[in-house]
Image: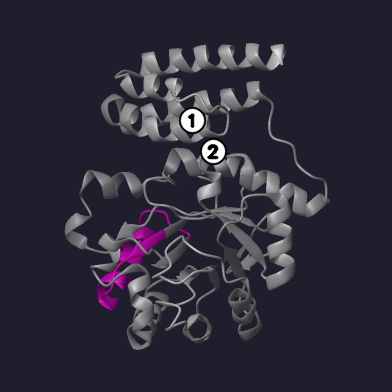
Amino acid sequence: MIQIGPYELPNRVALAPMAGVTDLPFRSLCAKLGAGLVVSEMITSDPSLRTSRKTQLRSRHDNEATPRSVQIAGSDPARMAEAARYNVDQGAQIIDINMGCPAKKVCRKAAGSALLADEALVADILTAVVAAVTVPVTLKIRTGSSPEARNGVAIAQLAQQCGIAALAVHGRTRACAFKGEVEYDTLRAIVDATDIPVFANGDIDSAEKAAAVLDHTGAAGVMIGRAAQGQPWLCGQIARSLDTGIKPEAPALATQFALLEQHIHDLHAFYGDFMGVRIARKHMGWYLQHQTRNNDFRRQFNSLSTPTEQLRLITTIFHTLSNKELAA
């Protein structure tokens, strides 16, 4: 099993931190369904934003499974160190550093994967954060800034030297974002160059793909990102398949809709009616894309403005799809 500081993970499958996705309701559901590790949405290191509603919600850990991993983002070593201490005080048991996000609004602030271009600054940030807290510190990176500046191996070795406890690597550069082939050979080189646990990340959407990536790269585990959207059971499915060798089957339609109903209800409770209804829309869209090509359901759901209406429509959609399943 994978060891991160004092924490032994129950399996080799982690849920990737994703802004706007891995909030407390979603990551709690994924953990309940078998993800070995879940990581929060990134939290800014800017102390002036610490009291904002967004940061406050991202910092909540109500009844969250352990270990609680919180990702922080920023480019100033002192601020990152202070953010690490603050989040540990709020309940974080692992601090994860974001050097993997390719989003322009993050990179414009010289944060996320933009940091990979400055190895000296990377070292300063890692050293400052590791020294600031007594909990394990992990790091999420990409293979480099661009195909012409692929320094993932050097960054990984630097991370190990600075005391990083585990590494997650998305197998593309910042410039590639989510386009093109994943560099599984580069991931293999990073694994071979380090002695800390490495999670392989990028386009892993099934148990078969996870097994193939682990075999090719030699990584300790896999990290599932976009493929888990609308499929909170996916990490657990993959984990069980890796442990048993048995090909997983998707949950029955009734099970999926029971989980969806609980998830949407939890979003309403967590965010309140106004924001909860709006955030539920994107999650519902992800669920539906795995069930039907009929966009009418999505349009109907997006037009609703109250929690009661949304939950009622979920029941209607379930009965409609169930009847089609029985008739098939």
Identify the residue shown where x is 42% and y is 63%.
177
Disc ID at residue 263: 1
Q: Residues within 10 Å of mark 1 (few under 14, many from 20)?
A: many
Q: Amino acid at mark 2?
A: Leu
Q: Residues within 10 Å of mark 2 (few under 14, many from 20)?
A: many
Q: Amino acid at mark 1?
A: His
Q: Outermost residue toward the right?
A: 245
- Magenta residue span: 71-93
Decide which of 152, 235 is in the foreground and name it: 152
Residue position marked by numbered label 2 in the rendering: 29
Identify the residue shown where x is 44% and y is 29%.
266
Left or right relative to 324: residue 95: left
Q: Position of residue 263 (x, y in %)?
A: 48, 30
Q: Is residue 14 above or below residue 28?
A: below
Magenta region includes residue 80: yes
Identify the residue shown where x is 33% and y is 26%.
277
Magenta region includes residue 62: no
- Tell me if label 1 and label 2 are in contact, CB under 8 Å: yes
Left or right relative to 171: residue 246: right
Decide which of 48, 143 is in the foreground and name it: 143
Q: Position of residue 38 (x, y in %)?
A: 53, 52
Snapshot quadrant of residue 10: bottom right
Secondary structure of the residue carrying tag 1 is: helix
Q: Is residue 62 visible?
A: no
CA distance separating discs 1 and 2: 7 Å
Q: Is residue 192 visible?
A: yes
